[in-house]
Image: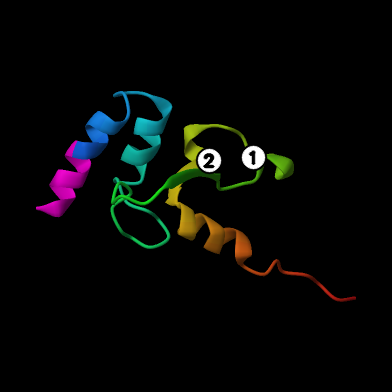
Amino acid sequence: MWDKRNQKLGKTYWAKDSKNYLIAQNQKWRCPICGQPILNGEEIETHHIVPVAKGGLNDISNLQHLHTPCHKQVHSKPKSTSLK
């Protein structure tokens, strides 16, 4: 029931067929980090899966909508460093 309600909200939150709408649709209207509906009242940030600095593009396939705390969590993960 709530899934359908959140999806319906999403369909009015962004213009249909807009880049943001298509990103949300690709991720089934859920935050890929916490699994909660993307439109649950929290602020949303758009995240590059492959950072632009590392060659990532602004294509829909390289973008995700994340809740702000989830976005911070992604960027706070320790970077792997090799000690030589």
Residue beneath disc 2: 62
Per the image, label 2 sits on a secondary structure element best described as helix
* Label placed on residue 56: 1
Predominant SS along the magenta part: helix
Residue at 21% across, 45% down: 6
Q: Tell me the distance, in whole angstroms, between the alpha carbons under discs 2 and 1.
A: 7 Å
Residue 69: image location, x then y, percent: 47, 59
Residue range highlighted in magenta: 1-8
Report the side of 74 relative to 51 (left or right). Answer: left
Query: Label 2 amino acid?
Result: Asn
Query: Label 1 amino acid?
Result: Gly
Give the camera-side residue of 41 and 9. Answer: 41
* Label placed on residue 48: none
Residue 26: image location, x then y, percent: 35, 41
Whether residue 4 is situated above or below residue 16 in the rendered picture: below
Tell me, what colour scheme is on the image? rainbow
Give the camera-side residue of 55 and 46. Answer: 46
